[in-house]
Image (spheres, rainbow, N blue to C red):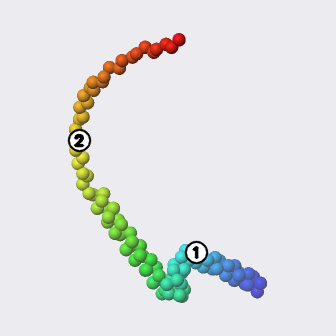
Amino acid sequence: MNKESAELNKEKVEIEQKIKAIEVDVGPAVYVAQALYGSKDASSIESAIRVIIFMIVFAFDPLAIVLIVSAKKPEEVIPEPKPVVVLPVKQKRRVVRKPKVVA
């Protein structure tokens, strides 16, 4: 009898671990389902997941289209700048005067 209860407890622990692993994966969806519908049942979780998928589609698909269109836009041709001719500037000659010595 003790062997049977030990085996059943072992199976129970394994099943609880599997349930915890699944809850970790589905946790954010459960949170959204509770926020939107107020319950944790499977139908509200599925509806919440659909809502999240639609939000992602409506948010990121237009962004992807804009990025694709902007990447395919032909480049504008920038004209070559005209060469600038620099003429020498005539400068006045400076006259250097000798300093006056005051004695």
Task: Name the residue furthest front.
Answer: 103
Please tell me which residue is depicted at 23% across the width and 35% down the height of the picture. 83
Residue type at tag 1: Val
Which element type, helix, strand or loop, lies under badge 2? loop
Please tell me which residue is depicted at 39% across the width and 71% down the height of the picture. 59
Q: Residues within 10 Å of mark 2 (few under 14, many from 20)?
A: few
Considering depth in this image, is 14 or 92 the residue closer to the camera?
A: 92
Q: Eyeballing the image, is 103 above or below 44?
A: above
Image quadrant of residue 88? Answer: top left
Q: Which residue is mark 2?
A: 80
Considering depth in this image, is 45 or 8 the residue closer to the camera?
A: 45
Please tell me which residue is depicted at 49% across the width and 84% down the height of the picture. 36
**Residue 95 point in image, percent of width and height:** 36, 18
**Residue 27 point in image, percent of width and height:** 56, 77
Question: Which comes sooner in the sequence, label 1 or label 2?
Answer: 1
How many numbered circles does the render carry?
Answer: 2
Do the numbered discs 1 and 2 sit on residues whose CB atoms are within 8 Å? Answer: no
Image position of 63 (left or right of 5): left
Q: Residues within 10 Å of mark 1 (few under 14, many from 20)?
A: few
Considering depth in this image, is 34 or 12 the residue closer to the camera?
A: 34
Quarter that holds the N terminus: bottom right
**Residue 29 point in image, percent of width and height:** 51, 78
Which element type, helix, strand or loop, lies under badge 1? helix
**Residue 39 point in image, percent of width and height:** 54, 88
Considering depth in this image, is 19 or 4 the residue closer to the camera?
A: 19
Please tell me which residue is depicted at 36% across the width and 66% down the height of the picture. 63
Residue type at tag 2: Glu
Image quadrant of residue 92? Answer: top left
Residue 22 seen in render: no
Residue 71 seen in render: yes
Looking at the rendered structure, which numbered label has been put on residue 24?
Answer: 1
Q: Eyeballing the image, is 72 above or below 8?
A: above
